[in-house]
Image: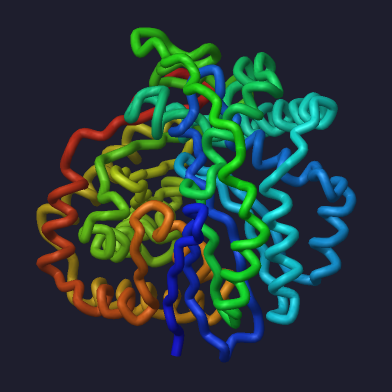
Amino acid sequence: MAQFRTHTLSNGLRVAAEIDHRCYSTAIGYFVHAGARNETDRESGLSHFLEHMMFKGTATRTAADVNRQLDELGGNSNAYTSEEQTVYYATVLPKFQDRLVDLLTDMLSPSLAKDDFDTERQVILEEIAKYEDQPPFGAFERVMEIYYGPRGLGRRVLGTKESIESMRVEAMQDFFNRRYRPENIVMAATGNVDFDGLIASLETLTQSWPDRPKPAAPPSDDPSSLPEGIAIDANLEIEDASQAYLVRIHRGPSMASEDRYASRILASILGDEGGSRLFWELIDTGRAETATAWPQEFADSGAWFSYLVCEPEKLKSNAKLMEGVMTRTANDGVTTEELEQAKNKAMARCIMQSERPSNRLFSVGSRYLTQQNYVSTDELLERFKSIDEQMIGRVAKEYLLESPTQVIASATSVEA
């Protein structure tokens, strides 16, 4: 039986662990409250840039040492940045817990050398260019910028070409010292965890973290202007695009909302890639290549996305069909058969994901970082079981009937 334990170190670092000694692996990660919404215009893309720099070496390890030692531990390791957090994680055999904690903790005191910074800047610029060349050509970023505004949750995780080119290593060092403080970080662990040993190691390894300098806050942005490199036109003209890409946002439930469980089930009924209402209406009929919908939860906000890909001349009619499916779902509800099927899929997925500590790590760490609470697998299953047709109908009416914010990416001017 899994056991959840927490502890706050003397320096303010929070530790949250879902412990199950039946597991054959241990997953550990640092969850840092540093994401795109925490940046200013001059810092746009800095959280993601900094994530890259964490693998470039420390005072005691070179970049080669960091990568070699991660490989030596034999597990899976990586990092990612989102609008609200940056995460560094790995999964290893339990006997390597101490070595992994030492390595990850050391990585969170990076050298941030100027030569590495200048080299990695080019990697980031290539990543931005590559992403902008791929469908749907930045349409998701654009719709977030229009819906939330170009700052906060609407700020691009990668930043812009302009912000990355003008960025300086001193700005990164200041950002690191402001955001990477122990009280702003959660160490999460799942699986076969030696919790007491973990706490003892962290007390020693992180004792100097509070000594990091505290730079002044950067100048505030001018809310009356757009950040450099940002446009909020709802139409993206892509010269070589052969299809049209429509992205829409409705309001959705946050991570703190009880509506999030019913919304996930509703999304399965409405927009799963196979067997959903949008699938049968638009994909199975050959009208569209992609037609899907899903909720995205943030700490204090949420969004319902819908996404349609089809031939440009079919976009307007297909968009109306998609709207019709969503409106009918909100007005008429769902069938008992649909609901039971979606609940069974959600619970099966939940159970299968819970078998791996590496999967549970992100749920435990992200939730404790943003909400300061814990949802067990059993509790999640009970939440799904309790959902009935009335709950689905209420959530559908709450979120699907408002006029959406939309962006279209295509080679020619089309309407939806």
Q: Nearer the viewer, residue 144 or 277?
A: 144
- State the quadrant of the C terminus: top left
User: Residue at the spot x=62%, y=54% of the render?
Assistant: 207
In the rendering, at what x and y percent does residue 5 appear?
44, 75
- The image's colouring method is rainbow
Who is closer to the viewer here, 323 or 256?
A: 256
Judge whether 399 appears above or below 139 on screen: below
**Residue shown at the point (32%, 29%) measured from the top left:** 147
Q: On the picture, is 305 further left or further right than 256?
A: right
Q: Position of residue 25 (x, y in %)?
A: 65, 80
> As displayed, is residue 261 above or below residue 398?
below
User: Which residue appears at 34% of the width and 8% of the height?
Assistant: 224
Residue 282 can be seen, yes or no? no
Q: Is residue 120 left or right of residue 133?
A: right
Depicted 273 relative to depicted 135: above or below = below
Q: Find residue 12 and report its horizontal and vertical position in percent.
A: 47, 53
